Amino acid sequence: MMSEPDQPLKLTLYVAGQTPKSLAAIRNLERICAEHMPGKYQVEVVDLRQRPQLAREHNIVAIPTLVRALPVPVQKIIGDLSDQEKVLVHLKVEG
């Protein structure tokens, strides 16, 4: 069933190359997931320099952007994810 409470979060982080902000976002996301959602998430990092067509397809207007595809509704968080509380609220993770 799709509405299982233990369904993993499906997260996609859109970055542009190895910029300091992109690297910070990756590090912050890894830390937040490890601390607050161990084993309960799938993360894909998409480099829009290598796959620019995805920016249009997924309506990515700023970099870095974290997209939570599951559970719906889709949530987007723009920035380097350094504000952990904001990230957790958007991801609907109980702290």
Image (cartoon, rainbow, N blue to C red):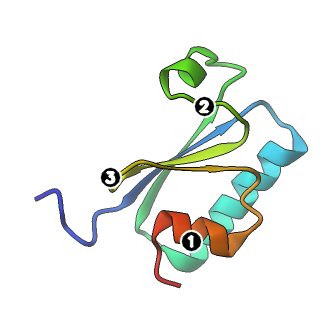
Q: Earlier in the sequence, mark 1 or mark 3?
A: 3
Disc 1 residue crowd, few under 14, some 14–19, many 20+, Cα 10 Å:
some
Name the disc covering residue 8, or none: none
**Numbered marks: total:** 3
**Is the Cβ of the residue at disc 2 closer than 8 Å to that at disc 3?**
no
- Residue at image position (25%, 72%) is 5
Q: Kindly tell me whether residue 33 is visible in this rendering.
A: no
Amino acid type of the residue tagged 2 in the rendering: Ile
Residue 35 position within the rendered picture, expressed as x and y whole percent measured from the top left: 59, 78
Comparing 53 with 31, the one in front is 53
**Is the Cβ of the residue at disc 1 closer than 8 Å to that at disc 3?**
no
Taking the image as shown, residue 82 lies to the left or right of residue 68, namely: right
To which residue does mark 3 refer? 72
Name the disc covering residue 60, or none: 2
- Can you tell which quarter of the image residue 13 is in? top right
To which residue does mark 1 refer? 88
Residue 64 position within the rendered picture, expressed as x and y whole percent measured from the top left: 72, 42
Q: CA distance from mark 1 to mark 2?
A: 20 Å
Q: Secondary structure at mark 2?
A: loop
- Residue at image position (49%, 21%) is 57
Taking the image as shown, residue 74 lies to the left or right of residue 88, namely: left
Amino acid type of the residue tagged 1 in the rendering: Leu
- Residue at image position (28%, 71%) is 6
- Can you tell which quarter of the image residue 51 is in? top right
Amino acid type of the residue tagged 3 in the rendering: Val
Disc 2 residue crowd, few under 14, some 14–19, many 20+, Cα 10 Å:
some
Taking the image as shown, residue 92 lies to the left or right of residue 28, namely: left
Q: Secondary structure at mark 1?
A: helix
**Is the Cβ of the residue at disc 1 closer than 8 Å to that at disc 2?**
no
Comparing 69 with 30, the one in front is 69
